[in-house]
Amino acid sequence: MHRVMSVKRSLTLAAAALALGTTAALSMPAMADSQPQAGAHRATRAAQVPDFTLDSTGTADLGGAPQGVGNAFGGRAAMKDVDGKNIGTAYANCDKDATGTSADQVLCTSVLKFSDGAQIAAEAVIPVPKAGVDPQPFDAIVTGGTLKYEGITGSARFTPTSVGVYEVSFS
């Protein structure tokens, strides 16, 4: 019986120590820096992202947002350089958050995957125009990247050039 009590007491103390450690860690100020961390596996600066065209024509993704608010859907588009050469694929997971008379508001989380394997993550609330309404430009929040784009943050501007085609530039 004494051994059982000892084990229970040890477990109780371990749980208390874990709780105190977690509380201490959460109450410490963030150790943030405006620059990406340097190290053996961290870039010190993200590479410049070239402007490119995002082209979803010829895919099944031009059907527009689903009818109901809260409905989720996915999409993809070709990424092309200024010469029209394919440089990657954009993948998006979206959900319709609001309906409007001229456009629906859709929240999308996207990954821009370049042919060399580098990736950039971005999020945006996108105005998806109703039939007969011209698409509008929008900005995305760039939240990070991999490989040569590790440490990237900022924004990307998506400017429509035709239905399903956007010019993308980063700032």
Image: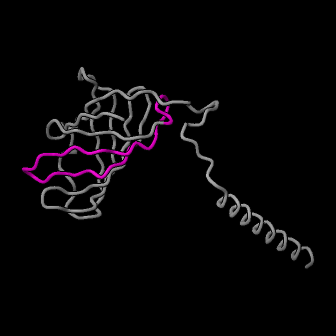
Identify the image quadrant of the C terminus. Answer: top left
Of all residues, the one furthest to the top in this rendering is 83
Q: What residue appears at the point 30 percent right and 33 percent down from the top-left corner?
A: 169
Nearest the viewer among 115 and 41 is 41
Describe residue 169's horizontal placement relative to residue 101 as left or right.
right
Nearest the viewer among 57 and 50 is 50
Nearest the viewer among 168 and 113 is 168
Q: What residue appears at the point 27 percent right and 22 percent down from the top-left corner?
A: 85
- Residue 103 lies in what quarter of the image? bottom left
Measured from the top left, where is residue 46 in percent x and y?
A: 48, 30
Describe residue 125's horizontal placement relative to residue 7 as left or right.
left
Measured from the top left, where is residue 128 in percent x and y?
A: 20, 51
Q: Is 20 covered by the magenta stretch?
A: no
Of all residues, the one furthest to the bottom in this rendering is 1
Nearest the viewer among 97 and 73 is 97
- Residue 138 lies in what quarter of the image? top left
Measured from the top left, where is residue 114 in percent x and y?
A: 38, 30
Q: Is 146 covered by the magenta stretch?
A: yes
Q: Which residues are magenta?
A: 122-151
Q: What residue appears at the point 24 percent right and 34 percent down from the top-left corner?
A: 167
Q: What residue appears at the point 33 percent right and 49 percent down from the top-left corner?
A: 124
Measured from the top left, where is residue 20 in percent x and y?
A: 74, 65
Of all residues, the one furthest to the right in this rendering is 2
Number of numbered labels in the structure image: 0
Identify the image quadrant of the N terminus. Answer: bottom right
Of all residues, the one furthest to the left in this rendering is 132
Residue 165 lies, with reference to residue 25, above or below; the image says: above
